[in-house]
C-alpha cells in the first residue's frame, strides 16, 4: 500500500498528537492553581462551567478520537505493507494494539516518514 506524501505526513502527525497533548496537559495541570485543592467546604450551589474546561474537554475527546483513528490507520498500513514480512507484521500489530499511543509515533517515524520522496516526484510521475 502506498500512501501519498500528504497522507504519510498526516498519519505521522496524527500518531504523535495524542502523546504531545498528554504531555502538555500534565505540565499545564501541574503548574495551574486550579489543579490544587486549597480547602474543603460544605456543598454550595454549582458554579457555571468555565469556558477553559469546556475547551480542554473538547480537546481531550478529539485527541482520543484522533489517537484511535491513527492507530487504526497504522494497523491498516501494517496489514497492507509490502515492506514487512509476516512475522514483522504480527509483531507490529501486537505492539500497536498493546502499546497504543506510545508505539504509534515510533511506527510512524520508522515506516511512515517519507524518505527520498518529494511532492515533485508525485507531480512528475505519469498518471497510472
Image (spheres, rainbow, N blue to C red):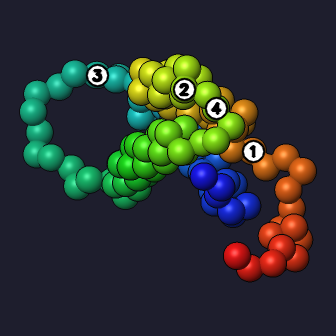
User: What residue appears at the point 60 percent right and 52 percent down from the top-left corner?
Assistant: 1
The answer to which of marks 1 and 2 sits earlier in the sequence is 2
Image coordinates of residue 68 in percent, x first then y, are 41, 43
Mark 4 Cα-neighbour bin, 10 Å: few <14, some 14–19, many ≥20: some
Secondary structure beneath disc 4? Answer: loop
Mark 3 Cα-neighbour bin, 10 Å: few <14, some 14–19, many ≥20: few
Secondary structure beneath disc 2? Answer: helix
In the drawing, does residue 40 fall left or right of residue 17? left
Secondary structure beneath disc 1? Answer: loop
- Can residue 74 be seen here? no
Contact (CB < 8 A) between labels 4 and 3?
no
Q: Which mark is residue 113?
A: 1
User: What residue appears at the point 55 percent right and 20 percent down from the top-left corner?
Assistant: 87
Which residue is labeled 2 in the image? 86
- Can residue 37 be seen here? yes
Which residue is labeled 4 in the image? 84
**CA gap, disc 4 and disc 3:** 57 Å
Query: Quadrant of the rendered structure where residue 105 is?
Result: top right
**CA gap, disc 1 and disc 3:** 50 Å
Q: How many marks?
A: 4
The answer to which of marks 4 and 3 sits earlier in the sequence is 3
Give above or below for 53 relative to 5: above
**CA gap, disc 1 and disc 4:** 15 Å
Residue that extends furthest to the bottom in the rendered view of this protein: 127
**CA gap, disc 3 and disc 2:** 58 Å
Amino acid at each position: 500500500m502506498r500512501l501519498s506524501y500528504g497522507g504519510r505526513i498526516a498519519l505521522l502527525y496524527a500518531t504523535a498528537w495524542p502523546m504531545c497533548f498528554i504531555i502538555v496537559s500534565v505540565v499545564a495541570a501541574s503548574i495551574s492553581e486550579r489543579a490544587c485543592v486549597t480547602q474543603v467546604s460544605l456543598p454550595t450551589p454549582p458554579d457555571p462551567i468555565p469556558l477553559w474546561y469546556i475547551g480542554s474537554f473538547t480537546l481531550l475527546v478529539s485527541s482520543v478520537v484522533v489517537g484511535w483513528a491513527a492507530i487504526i490507520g497504522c494497523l491498516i498500513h501494517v496489514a497492507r505493507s509490502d515492506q514487512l514480512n509476516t512475522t514483522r507484521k504480527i509483531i507490529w500489530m501486537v505492539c500497536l494494539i498493546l502499546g497504543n499511543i506510545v508505539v504509534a509515533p515510533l511506527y510512524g517515524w520508522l515506516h511512515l516518514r517519507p524518505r527520498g520522496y518529494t511532492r515533485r516526484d508525485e507531480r512528475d510521475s505519469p498518471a497510472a
